Image (tube, grey):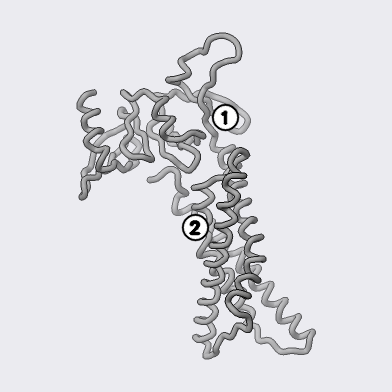
Amino acid sequence: MAQGRLPRWRTSSRLLVWAAILSATAVTNALVQVMDSGRHGTALALWEPLVWEFSSAGAVLLTLPLLWWGCQRWPLHVDTWRRLLPLYLLASVGWSLLHVVGMMVIRHLAYASLGHHYQDDDGWLQRFAYEYLKDVRTFALFVALEHLAGWFGRRRQGEASLLAAPDVGPPVEPVERPQHFLVRKLGKEFLVATEDVEYAQAAGNYVNLRVRGHDYPLRITMAVLELRLDPLVFLRPHRSWLINRGQLRSIEPLDGGEALLHMADGAKIPCSRRQLPLLRQALAGG
């Protein structure tokens, strides 16, 4: 399983929670629209605002996994938010466009299934501009919540860092080839031996270190981490993965020249076609 991604059950649970929140909001907004229509002396059947609201909520739900993936792929940090802000602004336009198109398709289908024809008095450009002014706030809210949840998750899960050279005196161990990682978790610090790292997977600006069933995100690139680890112990079967050769149990060849590496904890890690011969050579040499 790719450790840098959310488990499927967790994604489904989050979607169910947001589906409940958006559904409650849609029903409330629809009732308010019917009451406002009655106060102004015009009749409005309840099914129409329900279609309007649920079409919008449904389109949002369909695009949430894509938004979450983007937040994990390009996480915002103190030293990266200025560089990534234009990317997120551009993404908000694309997300809003998907929302509007999805919403309009759902409305047309819903009206047609009820024997009616949906008519939008606004043109597409005017409709998109109107919706974007609302969507950009929703987009910013979801992005903020996703990063806030990620921050709390890392605090609870623990975040690793490389041992730095001390200000005074010689380092306890070689800094260039660390024997331990420092893990901060819920205000406490402890050391994790490098040899206990079973494998590592790139996840955006982080690399997740797998240690005894736990993932510890380390803010580093995979290329830099590979240089810091002992090449006799850690092998690079894929551009997004490093493995501890002592945790490798078997190699399963696949069609096309790739392979799956079966690890001691049951994980299946991809090995690229280019790296497979190098991996076998390294294992034979060891």
**Above or below 117: residue 239:** above
Residue at the image point whose x is 24% and y is 36% from the top: 250
User: Taking 197 as reference, is 88 left or right?
Assistant: right
Q: Residues within 10 Å of mark 2 (few under 14, many from 20)?
A: few
**Three-letter code, disc 2:** Leu
Residue placed farthest to the right in the image? 39
Location of residue 159 by image quarter: top right
Q: Which quarter of the figure is the N terminus placed in? A: top left
Q: Residues within 10 Å of mark 1 (few under 14, many from 20)?
A: some
Q: Percent x, y for residue 223?
A: 41, 33
User: Taking 188 as reference, is 3 left or right?
Assistant: left
**Three-letter code, disc 1:** Arg
**Above or below 210: residue 48:** below
Location of residue 51 by image quarter: bottom right
Q: Which residue is mark 2?
A: 66
Residue at the image point whose x is 61% and y is 59% from the top: 139
**Above or below 245: residue 150:** below
Secondary element at image label 2: helix
Asked whether residue 179 is in view, the answer is no
Secondary element at image label 1: strand
Answer with mark 1 or mark 2, whichever residue precedes in sequence. 2
Q: Percent x, y for residue 38?
A: 76, 85
Q: Percent x, y for residue 86?
A: 59, 52
Residue at the image point whose x is 28% and y is 42% from the top: 272
Q: Which quarter of the figure is the C terminus placed in? A: top left
- Label at residue 184: 1
